[in-house]
Image: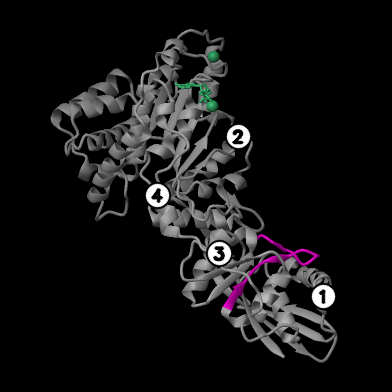
Amino acid sequence: MLVKSYGSAIAGIDAITITVEVSITPGVEYVIVGLPDNAVRESLFRIASAFEHTDYKKPGRRVIVNLSPADIRKEGSSYDLPIAVGILAASEQIASDRVGRYVIMGELSLDGSVLPIKGALPIAIRAREEGFRAFILPEGNAREAAVVNDLEVYGVKNLKEVCDLLNGDGHLQPVVVNTREEYFSNVSKFDMDFADVKGQEHVKRALEIAAAGGHNVLMIGAPGSGKTMLAKRMPTIMPPMTLKEALETTKIHSVAGRGSEGGLMTRRPFRSPHHLASPVSIVGGGANPQPGEISLSHNGILFLDELPEFQRNVLEVMRQPLEDKLITIARAKYAIEYPCNFMLIASMNPCPCGYFNHPTKECVCAQGAILRYMNKISGPLLDRIDMHIEVVPVEIGEFSRNRPAEPSEAVRARVVAARNRQTERFREDNIHSNAMMSTRHLQKYCPLTPESSRLLQGAMERLSLSARAYDRIIKLARTIADLENEARIKEAHIAEAIQYRSLDRETWGLK
Ligand SMILES: Nc1ncnc2c1ncn2[C@@H]1O[C@H](COP(=O)(O)OP(=O)(O)O)[C@@H](O)[C@H]1O
Ligand SMILES: [Mg+2]
Ligand SMILES: [Zn+2]
């Protein structure tokens, strides 16, 4: 007998339906065809063991399993379940008439229990698009897949539950996630707030500008000055993720096998990889390609804490994706893409000892040591960073003063308004934030008044700002003007923007 069951393969962040044909004919051997990798081949052993523990029989005849389309690479062990179901149906141990309605994915352990898979959300999206009625998958991935409406999602613990369901005598209910309700009730809910940070008005203002214009940021300050605390709160002042963004981000996490327990991710991700992280774990890749940190932070924040500690090659490989908002991972026979539209926030001490320019503590570093330290971060990455913000620790007195600070919600409202202005401005361009402006956009959207122009020229000379600072200052001034709902870039906007380019000043010796 011949039975078709359905599984799915992941390419990038999308899924492709895989047909699993099982044919049982006279003979003895087991054969799998259709470009399986080793894990798929090994699946026959797991299936045989699972059958034994679930009181099913391995057919004593010739079993041919064909995974198609053949030209799509099928990785991993999650085809165990559709293959097992196909074998059971083809050997008439379970009913075969319902099998074709389902997409079925899951790895079998030797005792017949079912282990989690990667990519449940994109698989569910594809299954619904192709008109499947339901998706049977491991219990742990069920909420992730149930984000998709109009598709029944069954989370199962073991092979037995799958068979009961297909035989029509199960009691298993589909898992239901009310995606819209979950989205709307969580999208603006955070467990931290900008108001938790005392003082630091100057830094908060700078971070508001960063969020408003999508500008990458470097914070420079002594240990304990609150850099990490501030960075972690960035998602709370950014515009809420749209439902589309939320789905996209959840898809990436799903593909990486880090699907959200809560179904849909509604908050912008905040990722903070360790400085010893490898280039592959940061940008993605590997033998079975996986999204890296830059993609896991898609639509959110990538925080590189202690920037100079990162390996130079890590910073180098981030250069292109920072520009393209997309990373392409090429293999001999195929290439896949992962989106990576993240905002970069980096932090660093001002010098090796940490106390250069500190209000009360003494820096013990030699001038040469400071220079070498700063030079570690110059080059590719620094060129993509619009703002350098100096963070000075708040005075002890500030902690006890208990002045109420502005809540994230209020800051966020201003950021949203400024973002809306940018959306309107770039309606006919292929960009959506001031940070993405090219020289051509700058000429079109950022004419300076004669006064502003004179101010900027003067500052360039007086502070010996490097040439690269020029465009950055205008971009930042554009965002500052947007926050004020000003069509024109005025002197005050330029004057403020100049403050956020500290590393271009001669004092740091970074040229
Ligand atoms: N402005 C501040 N308001 C409230 N707490 C602060 C502030 N600055 C520092 N802290 C406290 O100091 C701790 C260390 O801050 P952190 O953000 O880790 O500093 P950094 O990353 O600059 O080394 C924080 O966890 C927080 O408890
Ligand atoms: Mg820190
Ligand atoms: Zn020092």
Mark 1 vs mark 2: give the one in front: 1
Q: Is residue 50 left or right of residue 73?
A: right
The amino acid marked with disc number 2 is His
Q: Is residue 132 magenta?
A: no
Q: Which residue is mark 1?
A: 55
User: Where does residue 174 sit, x and y in percent of width and height?
Assistant: 56, 68
Q: Is residue 9 above or below residue 221?
A: below
The crowding category of the residue bearing disc 3, from other C-alpha atoms within 10 Å (few below 14, some 14 to 19, many at least 20), is some
Give the residue displayed 57% in from the left and 80% down from the top: 101
Earlier in the chain: of badge 4 and badge 1, it is 1
- The answer to which image quadrant residue 112 occupies is bottom right
Q: Is residue 355 left or right of residue 63?
A: left
Q: CA distance from mark 2 to mark 3?
A: 39 Å
Q: Is residue 115 magenta?
A: yes
User: Where does residue 83 sit, x and y in percent of width and height?
Assistant: 70, 76
Query: Which range is magenta?
Result: 102-116
The crowding category of the residue bearing disc 4, from other C-alpha atoms within 10 Å (few below 14, some 14 to 19, many at least 20), is many
Secondary structure state at the residue bearing disc 2: loop
Earlier in the chain: of badge 1 and badge 2, it is 1
Give the residue displayed 84% in from the left and 73% down from the top: 52
The crowding category of the residue bearing disc 1, from other C-alpha atoms within 10 Å (few below 14, some 14 to 19, many at least 20), is few
Q: Which residue is mark 3?
A: 175
Q: Are marks 3 and 4 in contact (CB under 8 Å)?
A: no
| Residue 241's disc number | 4
Mark 2 vs mark 3: give the one in front: 3
Looking at this rendering, what residue extends furthest in the left direction? 450
The crowding category of the residue bearing disc 2, from other C-alpha atoms within 10 Å (few below 14, some 14 to 19, many at least 20), is some
Q: Is residue 135 above or below residue 271?
A: below
